[in-house]
RNA sequence: GAUUCCGUAGCUCAGCUGGUAGAGCAUUACACUUUUAAUGUAGGGGUCCUGGGUUCGAGCCCCAGCGGGAUCACCA
C-alpha cells in the first residue's frame, strides 16, 4: 500500500508514529525559533512559515504531501447536490463508496468531529469527518494530528465515504477516509457566504488579474464566465462547420502586416535575419485561400495590435474571420444575425441578454440603418448630399473637432462615432461606409463614394465588421497605393502594399463576403462583463516584482544548488535534521541520488559535506 | 500619453488636527462528536507601495517614482 494512504485500515503503523511525531514537533518548534531570529532575510509571512513547518512534519510522519498516484474520482459535488435521491441510492451508507477530490475551502471544527467544505471543478460540498470513523483503532494520530493540526484550508484532499443529509438538512459526504493530495503553502483569501450574501469577496483587480488562479478558486462566477466564453466559441464553430466551412490556420508571424488599420508588434527572425510582424488581422491570408478554391474558410485568430489599452482593448485579442465565396454583404448580415442569435440562445436559453442595467435582445431581424440614415436619425441632419465643405460646417455645428487632413469619408466616420454609435444599444446593422475608410471593401453597387460594408453595433460598441470583398485587382492596387500615400504622410496605421496578395487576386477571386467578429467584445456582452480583462484569463499587465522565497526557509540555504535540492529530496529539510545526519552516510547517499537523478555535476568532497553540517 | 482616485496584517477594510498601528475573517493554543459567516477563552502576526523632503515627531503634509482603477486620446 502507498505509504501515504490514510485509510482507516492498517492503522497499526500509526501506533509507532506517535512518539516519533512528538519529537518531530519539538524539532519544528526549534526550527521556528531559528527562523524567527532570521526574519530579516526571510520574506515568508508567519502563516507561510507555519505551513512549511507542517509540510516538514508530514514528511517526517511518512506522509507524502505531493503523492504521485492518481486519485480515482467517481462523481462530483454538483451531481450529488442536484441529484440527491440518485446519489443517495448509489452512494448511501453501506453502499458504494463515493470518491471525490477537492480543495478545502472552510473547516468548522467541533472537537472530535469536523465539518469542512471541499471545492471541486463543479462547486462546493460539505464533508463530515468524525474521529472514530477516520481512526477506527486506538491510534487517533490521523485525526488528532494530521487532520486537525497539519491540514489547512487550501489543501487538496481526496475523500471516500457515503452521501447523507445532516440534521440541518444539508447534503454532505460522511468521510470514512481521506488522503492528502497536495499541501498548499500559501494561505488562501477567505471568502464567506450566508444566504447568498458574500463577505470579504476578493475584488482587487490587481490580485484577480495577476493571480487568476486565486480568482478562479475564490470567485466561482469567474469560472462560469470562462465556461460561457468557450461555449460561445463552440456554438459558432459548430454553426460554421455544419455549413461546411473549413476551419484553417494562417501565419501569425507575417513579413507584412495588413488587413486592418493598426500599429503592429515587430519582431525578428534570426536565421532569416528579417523583420516579422505579429499579425493585426488574418484577412489577406484567408482571401488567398478563397482564391485557391475553398468555398468558405474561417479562423479563430489571436491578433496583436500595438495600441493603447483600456477596458475594451488588450494588446492581444481574439477575432473570428470568415470568408464565403459567391456571397455578398447582404447575405452575410443574415448569417451574423442567425449565428449570434444562436449564441444567445445557447448561453442564456433566450435571445434577451442582461448587460449591466440594460437588456439586449438578439432576436432576428435586427434593425438596419445606412450610415447616412443613422446620422440623420440621431442628429436630424442629412449629410448624404453634402460636399466636404458643407460637411465640415455641419460637423462643427455638432461640436465635433476635425483636423485639416480629414477628408469627407473620415468626417462622416467622426460624426457617426461621436453622435450615433454610443446610442445604439440593441444590435443594429450600419451599412454602406465611405470608401476612404475601407481599402479592402468592394465599391457599392449603386452608391458612389461608398462601399458595401456593414458593422453590427451593440451596447454602443462595434461587434462585427464585414463587407463584400474587393476582388478587382486593379482597384485593389490603387487602394493600397492610396494607403501608401497615407503612410508616407505619417499615418502609422496605414496598410502596406502586399504584392503577393495582389498577385493572388489577379488570378481571380470569386465575389466573396467577409466577416470579422471580436470574440472578446462579444464575450463581454454575453457574460455581462464590464471589462475585457474579465473575459481574458491572463490580461496584459505591467510586470510585477515577485519576491522569491525559494528554499530560504529550509535552513539549507548555505548549501550550493543543486545539492540543497538533492538533500531536501532525501527527506532532510531543516538545519536540525542536517545536524543529526551521519556525514558519511549523507555523502554516500548524495552520490546515489546524483546517479539516480542523472545529475551532470561533479561530486563534492566529504569534507565539504561535513562543513555544511557543522555550520 | 493626459486627468483623477487608490495602495495599511494572508484577505476585506478602519485609522481623528501630525503624537506608541486597529477591527473582522484567517492563523496559533485550549475546549467542543450534526455544524454552517459554527461557538467560547487566550495569544501571535505590520518594509503603513518605494525613495526623498518638511517637522522635536509622518500611515497622515509636500515632491518624485512604481503598481492598479476610472475617464479621455488611439484602436477592435
Image (cartoon, coloured by chain):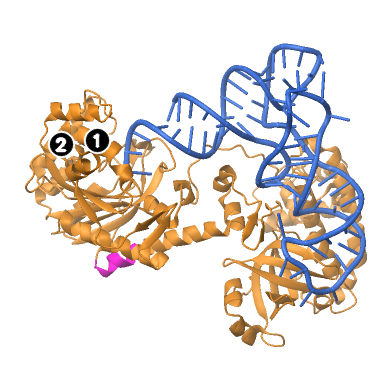
Chain colours: A orange, B blue
Asked whether the beta carbons under mark 1 and mark 2 sit within 8 Å of each other, the answer is: yes
Between residue B70 and residue A39, name the one nearer to us: B70
Place of residue B59 in the rendered image (x, y in percent of width and height, measured from the top left) = 72, 27
The disc label shown at residue A497, or none = none
Between residue A436 and residue A255, name the one nearer to us: A436
Q: Residue at x 15, y 33 (%)?
A: A481
- In the figure, is residue A609 to the left or right of A255? right
Between residue A583 and residue A443, name the one nearer to us: A443
Residue A582 seen: no
Using a 10 Å C-alpha cutoff, classify the residue at mark 1 as few (fewer than 14 neighbours), some (14 to 19) or many (20 or more): many
Looking at the rendered structure, the secondary structure element under dot 1 is helix
Q: Quadrant of the C terminus of chain A?
A: top right
Q: How many dots with numbers?
A: 2
- In the figure, is residue A160 to the left or right of A528? right
Looking at the rendered structure, the secondary structure element under dot 2 is loop
Q: Chain of mark 2?
A: A
Quadrant housing residue A42 = top right
Magenta residues, as a range? A236-244
The disc label shown at residue A415, or none = 1
Q: Which residue lies under the disc numbered 2?
A: A383
Q: Is residue A243 magenta?
A: yes
Residue A22 seen: yes
Place of residue A186 in the rendered image (x, y in percent of width and height, measured from the top left) = 70, 51
Q: Residue at x 71, y 52 (%)?
A: A187
Amino acid at each position: 500500500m502507498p505509504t501515504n494512504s490514510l485509510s482507516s485500515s492498517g492503522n497499526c503503523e500509526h501506533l509507532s508514529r506517535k512518539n516519533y511525531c512528538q519529537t518531530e514537533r519539538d524539532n519544528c518548534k526549534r526550527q521556528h525559533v531559528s527562523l524567527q531570529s532570521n526574519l530579516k532575510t526571510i520574506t515568508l509571512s508567519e502563516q507561510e512559515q507555519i505551513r512549511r513547518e507542517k509540510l516538514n512534519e508530514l514528511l517526517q510522519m511518512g506522509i507524502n504531501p505531493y503523492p504521485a498516484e492518481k486519485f480515482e474520482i467517481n462523481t462530483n459535488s454538483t451531481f450529488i447536490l442536484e441529484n440527491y435521491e440518485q446519489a443517495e441510492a448509489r452512494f448511501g451508507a453501506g453502499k458504494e463508496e463515493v470518491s471525490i477530490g477537492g480543495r478545502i475551502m472552510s473547516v468548522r471544527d467541533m472537537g472530535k468531529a469536523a465539518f469542512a467544505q471541499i471545492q471541486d471543478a463543479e462547486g462546493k460540498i460539505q464533508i463530515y469527518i468524525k474521529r472514530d470513523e477516520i481512526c477506527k483503532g486506538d491510534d487517533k494520530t490521523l485525526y488528532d494530528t494530521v487532520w486537525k493540526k497539519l491540514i489547512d484550508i487550501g489543501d487538496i484532499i481526496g475523500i471516500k465515504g457515503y452521501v447523507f443529509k445532516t440534521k440541518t438538512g444539508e447534503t454532505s459526504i460522511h468521510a470514512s477516509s481521506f488522503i492528502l493530495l497536495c499541501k498548499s503553502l500559501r494561505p488562501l483569501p477567505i471568502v464567506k457566504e450566508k444566504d447568498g450574501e458574500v463577505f470579504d469577496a476578493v475584488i482587487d483587480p490587481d490580485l484577480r488579474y495577476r493571480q487568476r488562479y486565486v480568482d478562479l478558486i475564490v470567485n466561482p462566477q469567474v469560472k462560469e464566465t470562462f465556461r460561457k466564453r468557450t461555449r460561445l466559441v463552440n456554438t459558432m464553430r459548430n454553426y460554421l462547420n455544419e455549413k461546411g466551412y473549413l476551419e484553417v490556420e494562417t501565419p501569425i508571424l507575417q513579413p507584412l502586416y495588413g488587413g486592418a488599420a493598426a500599429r503592429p508588434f515587430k519582431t525578428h527572425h534570426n536565421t532569416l535575419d528579417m523583420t516579422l510582424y505579429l499579425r493585426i488581422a488574418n484577412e489577406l491570408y484567408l482571401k488567398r485561400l478563397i482564391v485557391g478554391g475553398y468555398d468558405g474558410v474561417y479562423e479563430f485568430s489571436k491578433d496583436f495590435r500595438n495600441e493603447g489599452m483600456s477596458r475594451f482593448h488588450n494588446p492581444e485579442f481574439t477575432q473570428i474571420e470568415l470568408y464565403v465565396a459567391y456571397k455578398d454583404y447582404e447575405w452575410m448580415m443574415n448569417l451574423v444575425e442567425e449565428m449570434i442569435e444562436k449564441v444567445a440562445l445557447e448561453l442564456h436559453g433566450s435571445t434577451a441578454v442582461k448587460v449591466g442595467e440594460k437588456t439586449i435582445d438578439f432576436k432576428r431581424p435586427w434593425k438596419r440603418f445606412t450610415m447616412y440614415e443613422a446620422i440623420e436619425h440621431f442628429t436630424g441632419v442629412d449629410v448624404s448630399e453634402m460636399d466636404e465643405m458643407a460637411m465640415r460646417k455641419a460637423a462643427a455645428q455638432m461640436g465635433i473637432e476635425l483636423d485639416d487632413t480629414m477628408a469627407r469619408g473620415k468626417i462622416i466616420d467622426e460624426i457617426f462615432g461621436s453622435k450615433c454609435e454610443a446610442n445604439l444599444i440593441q444590435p443594429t446593422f450600419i451599412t454602406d461606409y465611405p470608401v476612404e475608410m475601407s481599402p479592402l471593401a468592394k465599391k457599392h453597387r449603386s452608391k458612389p463614394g461608398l462601399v458595401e460594408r456593414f458593422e453590427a453595433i451593440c451596447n454602443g460598441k462595434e461587434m462585427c465588421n464585414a463587407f463584400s470583398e474587393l476582388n478587382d485587382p486593379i482597384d485593389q492596387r490603387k487602394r493600397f497605393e492610396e494607403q501608401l500615400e497615407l503612410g508616407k504622410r505619417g499615418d502609422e496605421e496605414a496598410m502596406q502594399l502586399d504584392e503577393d496578395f495582389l498577385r493572388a487576386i489577379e488570378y481571380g477571386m470569386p465575389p466573396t463576403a467577409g466577416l470579422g467578429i471580436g470574440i472578446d467584445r462579444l464575450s463581454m456582452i454575453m457574460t455581462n462583463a464590464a471589462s475585457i480583462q474579465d473575459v481574458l484569463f491572463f490580461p496584459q499587465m505591467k510586470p510585477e516584482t515577485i519576491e522569491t522565497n525559494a528554499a530560504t526557509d529550509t535552513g539549507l540555504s548555505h548549501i550550493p544548488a543543486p545539492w540543497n535540492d538533492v538533500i531536501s529530496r532525501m527527506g532532510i529539510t531543516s538545519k536540525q535534521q542536517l545536524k543529526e545526519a551521519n556525514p558519511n552516510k549523507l555523502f554516500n547517499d548524495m552520490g546515489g541520488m546524483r546517479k539516480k537523478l542523472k545529475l551532470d555535476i561533479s561530486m563534492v568532497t566529504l569534507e565539504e559535506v561535513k562543513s555544511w553540517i557543522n555550520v
